[in-house]
Image (cartoon, rainbow, N blue to C red):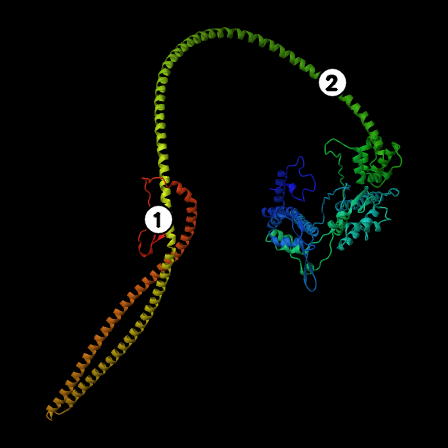
Amino acid sequence: MADARSFHYLNQSSCIEVEGINDAEEYLATRRAMDIVGINEEEQEAIFRVVAAVLHIGNINFAKGKEVDSSVIQDDNSRFHLNTASELLECDCNNLEKALITREIVTPEEIITRTLDPESALASRDALAKTIYSRLFDWIVEKINVSIGQDPNSKQLIGVLDIYGFESFKINSFEQLCINYTNEKLQQHFNQHVFKMEQEEYTREEINWSYIEFVDNQDVLDLIEKKGGLIALLDEACMFPRSTHETFAQKLYTTFKNNKRFVKPKLSRTDFTVVHYAGDVTYQADHFLDKNKDYVVAEHQDLLNASSCPFVASLFPTLPEESSKSSKFSSIGSRFKLQLQSLMETLSSTEPHYIRCVKPNNLLKPAIFENTNVIQQLRCGGVLEAIRISCAGYPTRKTFYEFVNRFGVLGPELLEGSNDDKIACQKILEKMKLENYQIGKTKVFLRAGQMADLDARRAEVLGKAARIIQRLMRTYIARKQFVLVRRSTTHLQSFVRGTLVRNLYECMRREAAAVKIQKNVRRHKARESYLLLQAATVTLQTGLRAMSARKEFRFRKETKAAVHIQARWRCHRDYSHYKNMQRAVLTYQCAWRQRLARRELRNLKMAARETGALKEAKDKLEKRVEELTWRLGLEKRLRTDLEEAKAQEIAKLQETLHDLQLQVEEAKTMATKEREAARKAIEEAPPVIKETPVLVEDTEKVNSLTAEVDQLKALLQTERQATETAKKEHAEAERRNEELMKKFEGAEKKIEQLQDTAQRLEEKATNMESENKVLRQQAVAISPTAKALAAYPKSPFQLRTPEIVNAPNGEVKSSPVSGKNIII
């Protein structure tokens, strides 16, 4: 966390810490206040991020760039604050830097980017910080107003206006001019209000009065706010790019040289003095132009509108295209004047009540009043002038009822039989012989000092009445006290007599009790003496027994301690011998391991030389993979051709079988028809005529048909055998096909294994190369130590040495010493 003194916007004064104010408590109170007005945690964090970003922006400094009228970030510290500000605002760092050191000029033909010199870049930085802080302040004010929940439809309101008084310091700038201008306006309204109230009061009561003169400060207001006044000239100077504070001051000197409210100091070229209502104030015009400018640079607007933080982007909403393209001039002074006019209109439409706060001393301590300082504040605040206006008329006024109620004691006889308060007031004033008073419709108006005379006479009458009342009250109190004392005396005498009798009875009772107590005390003392002697005897016996027991315990404890010391000593001696032996063994083992390490280093160097052989094996494996891939494709094509030929052969056999079945059915049909024809012919023919030839012909036909049927059966049997043979061939082809599929799957698995092996070979080759480099470096580092330890003898403690195992199918084995993977 950075100190407040490290920020440019905070270290302009030496006042960093204020006595009696705890910043931590103030921070917690601020957070609680934010919670109360409805600002949630995210908005609070965003507010503090924006404030921190403003502080970091103030620490960005610029140096002269390589080009003319250009600037760059001054150093690493400024760069750090630039990056921090961009992170807090959640905008692009390069765009933020560009927005600070460049400007874009929009022309009808093109957009021209112009670089800024360091002074202009600083002004751009301050303008950005001021704009961000102003937008944040407006957002907080709007949030608080929304949280308060004022009813916009309300016809009545109660407002509190709290402002600073007139300010006059050693250095007075634009802020003091605005504050004093506000006080001038309010002072004029105060004077007019007091005068107006007095005038309305006198007119309403219909009394005789004369015009009261008061000091009018309209000429000072004309000097500041009128057309051609200070604010108008300041706006005019701000609209010209080449205007400076000196040209602005010269313009003021020339314009107001004859104005009695404007004075030019003799020894200054930029200062000017305004004769205010409260006194003369000298202003320094050095920063008037910078503080009066109020416009958002387009680059700053675009930068913050594009922020990824929703809160920051909401502070800079997207402007309409017309307003974004047009660059109308806006100033703080003009806006302040409009706001002040609106305030005065509000005050004029309400009934104001004034509370004047007076600072009693400059030490900020209680019970100390500096008369000169207080009088000066009252004079500057217009209080003395208001008192003068009131005293010029009738400063004291009372209603008839209040006057009669207060001063009726001055003439009680005048109030008897009269119910009119006005007549009673007039009679009382005539009796008191007062002059120059006025009696209105509802009030009595008195001149300055007359109320004090009436109060003095009233106090005198009340004093006399008080003394009479005191005398009567004292008489009553004295008699009441005498009666009380007499009654108390009687009660006291009876109480004393009873007390004496009670004391006598108490003495007799005490004597009887004393005798009884003495008897019991003597018996108690005798018993205590016996118990004491008994206790002493028991204590003496206990002490003797304890002493003998302690001696026995001490002897046993010493014996145990001696045994324990002997055991600890023997353990220490044996442990020291064991540690010496262990140290020697470790030293011997280290020497032997170093020798084995050198041997392993030589083996690894030899393995590194075999990297080329591994690469050749990799190439062979790749060629083998390609060959297996080609064979696999060939087997796929052969299998496809075999399946197609088999399908065609099966289709042909099925067609032949179908034709044979048709022929068999036709032969059967023909044989059936011939049999029926023969049977009909036999039945129709006569039994005698040529019976034998017919039987011969029918027998021949039957035999021929039977032979054809047998041939068809044989052909059918042949076709069935051919079909079974085809089925067996088909089953055999399917079996071979399944075997080929299994071989194909095994080939695919082998191809995948070969690819994995090839990939591992590549990785191992890379690892071997990197290990060779590391081993070379280690060999260079170990060689001096290895030479020094070469004279050590071999150790009987054998370690496992690297072994090369003939692993099938290029499996990966692990070296038992180094733990590295070796591919065989």
Q: Nearer the viewer, residue 142 or 491?
A: 142
Q: Where residue 478 is drawn, which disc sits there? A: 2
Seen in the picture, residue 112 relative to 709 is either above or below; the reply is: above
Q: Position of residue 116 (x, y in %)?
A: 69, 54
Q: Is residue 522 visible?
A: yes
Q: Amino acid at mark 1?
A: Ser
Q: Is residue 821 left or right of residue 506?
A: left
Q: Where residue 815 is drawn, which disc sits there? A: 1
Seen in the picture, residue 657 relative to 307 is either above or below; the reply is: below
Mark 1 falls on what kind of element? loop
Q: Position of residue 475 (x, y in %)?
A: 76, 19
Q: Position of residue 718 (x, y in %)?
A: 20, 77
- Graded by Cα atoms within 10 Å as few (under 14), some (14 to 19) or many (20 or more), the crowding at tag 1 reads some
Q: Position of residue 470 (x, y in %)?
A: 77, 22
Q: Amino acid at mark 2?
A: Ala
Q: Nearer the viewer, residue 25 or 808?
A: 808
Which residue occupies 80% across, 40% down? Answer: 380
Q: Nearer the viewer, residue 470 or 244?
A: 244
Q: Is residue 588 left or right of residue 268?
A: left
